[in-house]
Image: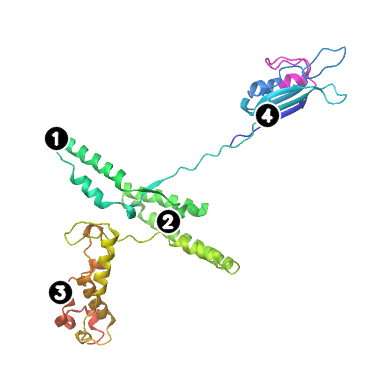
Amino acid sequence: MTTIELIVGSHLLPWTEFQCVGSSGPFAAALTKVVYQTTWTQHVVAPTRYRAGQQPSLLDLVITNERHLVDQVTISAPLGHSDHCVLTFDFICYWARNPEPQTWIRNFGRADFSGMRIFLDQVKLGPASVEDLYRTIVQKVHEADAMFVPKKPARSRMSRKLPKRIRRVLEKRSQLFFKKLTTGDTDELAFRKMRNRCKSEIRQWNIRKQATILDLARKNRNVLFKYMRHRRRNKPSAFSLRDRNGEPTSDPIVVSEFYREHYAVLDLFPLEYRRLRGDLILTYALFGQGLANRFLTVDPANTRRGHSERQLLNDKNKTDPGNLGESLDPVYQSVNP
């Protein structure tokens, strides 16, 4: 940050030449040397002191460390019986704050996928080399992204609001992770220690922060509501819905019809199919099978990795009502042998 310096006053240096270093007297020589070496600017060029029988002299000075800080220097008549003129000038003192760079991200929740599909279907690829075809496809995809996917400002992440101590630990963890990728398993132990330390530091910081919020909420409940809205800013993404023809759609009317139809007919298997009475895990399996048979068709590429990978609902032996007792894992069979 640049420091603004302004020196105004009568210095009693009537014959000082600020255009050169050499001047009469030790104080005049020291002042002119400082002004010359630090590239300061003296803005008064006309005499400012008039006395009968004496030569007009330049005594009142306006010195700044930057030329643009002072403008419109005016020398007016003295006040009362003084022989020093009145100096008026415009002092331009401001701080131009650099705006924070705005980051924009794609808002896929409001994207027009139907329009994007129609636009890409109209692209015709003629005979050309592989490189030319690749460049054409990339160009069209970028055009579709610019036309049909709106942008939204990115919100600040939580890591920016963490204390400096935790941010330094996170940076150290990133450095160890990069070193682990480049050097192999030699730094695996150091990376794990730093990762566990980051988790512990952030956990303790969250506990202290939430305790502070609860204390403030006793006096002002809006503090708690504001924190709850902040925690809910990241909402889970929805699946890619497809119509009956297998085409992806983003029409809100079609989406609402899908949810209304499929949730209206959702039911469970009859209770007599449960051969293990009171087995909650079996009940969950039956409920999941009924949900999977009647739920929406989703895009496998956008399906999150989770319970679907356990093959609990896809294995016929584990969901067939006739084989439920024999197909359960040993840990489940031990409930009712």
Which of pointers 3 and 2 indicates the residue nearer the eye?
A: 3
The location of residue 14, given as percent across then percent down, is 79, 17
- Marks 2 and 1 close (CB-CB < 8 Å): no
Secondary structure found at label 4: strand
- Which image quarter is the C terminus in? bottom left
Which of pointers 2 and 1 indicates the residue nearer the eye?
A: 1
Q: Is residue 337 left or right of residue 204?
A: left
Per the image, the residue denoted by label 3 is 316
Residue closest to the far front:
253
Which of pointers 1 and 3 indicates the residue nearer the eye?
A: 1
- The residue at 75%/16% (across/down) is 16
Amino acid on which disc 1 is placed:
Ser
Per the image, the residue denoted by label 4 is 90
Per the image, the residue denoted by label 2 is 194
Sequence order check: which comes first, mark 4 or mark 1? 4
Q: Quadrant of residue 86?
A: top right
Amino acid on which disc 3 is placed:
Lys
Secondary structure found at label 2: helix
Secondary structure found at label 1: loop
In the image, 265 versus 93, the foreground residue is 265
Amino acid on which disc 4 is placed:
Asp
Sequence order check: which comes first, mark 2 or mark 1? 1
- The residue at 15%/37% (across/down) is 130
The location of residue 177, given as percent across then percent down, is 37, 51
Sequence order check: which comes first, mark 3 or mark 4? 4
Decide if residue 174 is in sight here.
yes
